[in-house]
Each structure stands twice: as structure tokens, then as C-alpha cells.
Amino acid sequence: MCAKSDSDCYRYGSKQKLKINSISSRTIMKTIPFSIKQLILLLFIGNILSVNAQKSMDRYPVLLNMVHHNPGEPHFETKFTQPEYIQALGYTGQVPKIEIQCGLTYDDWEDNVVPEGTAEKMWILRHAAEVRTRLAIAEKNKMPVYPFTDVLVVPKSIMDKYGDVMKVDGRLSIKSPKTQEILKAQITEIFKRFPSIDGLTIRHGETYLHDTPYHVGTSPAITPEEHSIMIALLREEICVKQDKKLFYRTWDFGKFHTNPEYYLKATDAVAPHEKLYFSIKHVNNDFLRGNPFNTTIGLGKHQQIVELSTNQAGIYGRNAHPYYIGKGIIEGWSEMESKKGLQDLYDNPKIKGFWTWTWGDGWVGPYFDNELWIKLNEYILRAYAKNPDHTEEELFFTYAKDELGLSKKNAQRLRELCLLSTDAVYYGQATKYARTIPWYIRDHYMTGIDLTRVVEDGLTEKILKEKELNLQHFYTMETLSKEIQLPRPKDQEFLEVSTTYGRIKYEIINEIWKIQLMLAQYAVNQKIDKEDAKAALTRYKIKWKEWRQLRKDHVSCPTLYVDYEAIHIPWFKPFQESVKELEDIILYQ
């Protein structure tokens, strides 16, 4: 293998070949017998390949993994939470979601600030014991741990006592000396109580308290100035005083992690440190298709790692059905006007590695117990981080052969299925002809989408045709799933069932588009074809019946979506309300 930055290597397409450049080697070789020439040449080439292979492995020294359990729900049961498992896969660190900030009493800072003999303190001590148990497993397996840590979340008793003086201009702020004091106390006690951890991954922007009944708080940094203050404080407390690593996530709602000017203003005020990294999502928004590559990646003077998600914000099925993301994330998505992906980061020395979310990144379901599609997507991202001089296609066929044990023919069929899924899923929900809000399908919720603008722009027929043509990809995928032969019967069943599951899901979404277009047409011109409307409603109900039958017939079938509620996406209405609205129009108009 050869590293992209080496002058002795070059790319052809997405592959690399070796070129041997030596000023004097040809002259020397003329004086040596042929057989010895061959030996020297082989040794020479072998040495270059060995050096370049090591460079390839060293290019991205940071490779983290996290399972983000759904807030307020039972934890996912998966090997990806097991330190020994992810270590064997080659990860250099684990980011466990164990609410480490909630296992602190703050007694060293102020004695009995969380009163003894209370349910609050008992919960904290019990939680601390659970955290130490988890950390002991990681320590035993020599897996570095960087817990996912919410700042600033503290016991309610502390917020009740000092909350008012922790605020500036009416909100919690790191500008307050008391907030800084408490944050320092938090960091100090974390490393005293849990000394085996290797650093912290700092989360802000979103704070979820579903699993922490005695804690409150939120991020104390919103402005660039506040972030500079907080980063500098954490750098001093973690990197300097503790000699541990700090991964500072830039994720928020459209400022720090997507605005270059904001990012530079927040980070340039802080001196670099060899153990300070900024973690940035690869997308210039949330993990959604249709957005450009993140514009803050590679900027500034600090080290960075790039966040990746196998679940893509829960928008595209959460691996309950085929949706291959490897090619799009590495090379850039098909819809990008200017393609950019992970492969374009190689020459930027600021980029030190990647952080993959294997489970989570959303809410609720679908739920399932086979990791076929998760493992495929995870492998491609991980293998690329470890071997960035390999193409996505090479990595895919290596996985198909070495991990799945597929023949060449079966591997090619799987490749075809996966590549079809990449756009079939995306364009099953989105459209090439208009910009729509993608969140109307998230996690296991199906909701209504306002298509009034689409109707007003005269795009109805184009989009209907687009959706029908897109379904053909799913029919092909379903056929391929039955032709592919996997060695493990359980995987074979899940391959077939999950692909059929996806096909029915997108047939249902196709009817959602049709019904929403009818409602939009009615809103625009008060006209509707009642027979077409009745037919759409009938098809919608038939497809749900087929979906439920699939679940009854196969225990491996993921849980189904729901169309009767829309939690966590309150700006959309459950699709059953659209069904009722169309039924009323048919009945009363």
C-alpha cells in the first residue's frame, strides 16, 4: 500500500499504483547478475510497500466508537459496547454514554452540598459504582475511554443553591465566575473518582436528562466568546493538569459546527495542545443527505477528528433495511454539485482521525436484532480510516469475501443491491426537483409533509413519475436479496426480510407523497379527483396490511413504523391526520 502524500505514489481513478524513482539504481543494476537484480528489486519494492503500509496505518491515529443509547430507553444490547470487541476491530478509543458527570457528589468542593441521607445523593453514589464497573471492564481490556460528557449538568441541589449566580443575562453562562468554579470542580472530581479514564468527550448544544432524575443543566456556551472561555478552561483542567485528552464537539444548531467565521473566532483564541481535538460532523448540518460537506473541517490551527454515523440521524431506516453509506461518505454523494468526502481530507495534517456512532443517533425504533447492515456500514468507515489508500470498492469486496464469506458472484450481487439502496432510499423520501424538509420521516415515525409549493410550481407529475421509477430499484433489490447466498442462515433470512421490509416501506412512502400532493392540490385550487383519492387510500391500507403480515411471518422482521403519532418531530403531524383529512374531503366535498 502507498500513502497518498508520498511523491512515489499516484492515484488512478480511486486506486493507487507504485512508482520507483531512483537516480542511480539503474546504473547499479546493470553491473549485477539478473537473478540478484530480481532479489534486490523485490527487497527494494518490499521495503517501500512496508514503509507505505505503516504510513497508511498511521495517517489517522484516532479512531473512536460510540453506541448512543436512545435517551430514556433501555440500552442497546450490542457487541459494539464491549471494549474487547471494538479493540479487536482496531478502535483506539471508546466513547461510552454512561453519564459520568452524574456520578459526582462535589463534597471536595463544598462539603455536603448534596445533602447526606437524600435520594439524590444515594442515586449519585449508586450511579458512580455502576460507572466504575463499566470502566473496570475497559481498563482490563486496555481500551482507552473518553466518556460522552454533558456540560454543565449538575445535581439539582447545586443548581437550586447557585443557579442564579451561574447566569449572565438570564441564562446559564461560562462567563459567570461561579459557573467556572463549578465546572472546574466537576472536572477535578471526575478524574479523582474515575482515574482510569483517558480523557473526556465534551458534549454541548443538546442536553438530554431523560436518564438522570436528580440532575439539571444545559450548555453554558452559546457565543464564540463563551466557547473560547470554556475550551480554554477545559484545556487547562484536562490536558494540562490531568495530562488527558479532550475531544470538544462543535455540534450545535447551525453556528459553531457549520459557520467557518464562528468556528475560527471560537477556536483561534485558544492555544493548541497535543491532547486537544475538535470533533466535527462530516456534514454541514446534521447527518443528512442533500447538504454539503462540512465547511469547518480543516480550518484553524487545532487538531480535528470527523464524526460519522451509521444511522444518519435516524432519517433513512437506521439500518433496519439496506441503505449503504460507504461510497457516499468516502467519495461524496451523487447529488453533490461539487463532490467531497473523506478521501479529500488525506492531505490535511489537521485531520487526525474519525469517530463513528454505531448505534443510536436518533430516538426510538425501528428495533431489530441482526446487525447485518450496521456491520457493513461500520466496517467500510472503519476500514477506510485504517487503510485510506484503499478505494471504497476494494474495501467493500474485502468485507464481502473475508467477513461474509461470499463468492465473487454473490459479492457482486450484494454490491449491486447496496449501490441501488444508496439513492433508492434517499430519493424514496426526497426529490430531485424540489427542496423538502427531510424530517417528516424520522426514526419510526411517518408524518405528513406540506407539498403546496410543489403543486404551485407545477412539479406534481414529475415527482409522481420520479417516485414510481425509484420503486423499481427496490424491486430489483428484493430480487437480488433472494439470489445472494450468505453462509449464515440467520443473516440470509434478515437479508431477504429486511429488503422486503424496505420495499414495502417505500411503497407506503410513495402513497404518502401521492396523498400529500392531492391535499396540496385541493388547498391550491379546491379540486380533487375523488376516485384517485379513494384508490390512494386503499393502496395505503393494503400496503400496511402487507407490512404487518411480514412482521407476523418473520421474527427477524424489524419493528414497523407508526403513522399515528410524531414524537420528537413536533413540527409535523402524524400521517393518520392526512388520511383523515383526505377521507373527509371525499365524504363532504
Image (cartoon, rainbow, N blue to C red):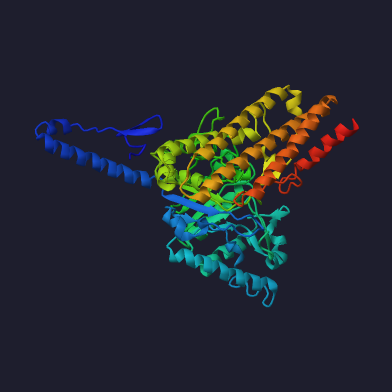
Give the percent coordinates (x, y) of residue 146.
Answer: 51, 58
- Farthest-out residue, top: 458
Camera-nearest residue between 100 and 47: 47
Q: Residue at x 69, y 75 (%)?
A: 118
Camera-nearest residue between 231 and 427: 427
Q: Residue at x 45, y 65 (%)?
A: 139
- Farthest-out residue, bottom: 117
Q: Residue at x 28, y 44 (%)?
A: 50
157 lies left or right of 585: left
Quadrant including the C terminus: top right
Camera-nearest residue between 249 and 530: 530
Q: Where, by quadrant of the figure, is residue 6 drawn?
A: top left
Check the image and report above or below for 252 versus 86: above
327 lies left or right of 251: left
Q: Where, by quadrant of the figure, is residue 519 drawn?
A: top right
Is residue 181 among what the camera can see?
A: no
Give the percent coordinates (x, y) of residue 309.
Answer: 55, 46
Is residue 294 among what the camera can see?
A: yes
- Number of marks in the image? 0
- Farthest-out residue, right: 588
Check the image and report above or below for 324 versus 271: above
578 lies left or right of 442: right
Q: Where, by quadrant of the figure, is residue 505 drawn?
A: top right
Quadrant including the N terminus: top left
Give the percent coordinates (x, y) of residue 230.
Answer: 58, 54
Check the image and report above or below for 1 versus 139: above
Give the percent coordinates (x, y) of residue 562.
Answer: 72, 46
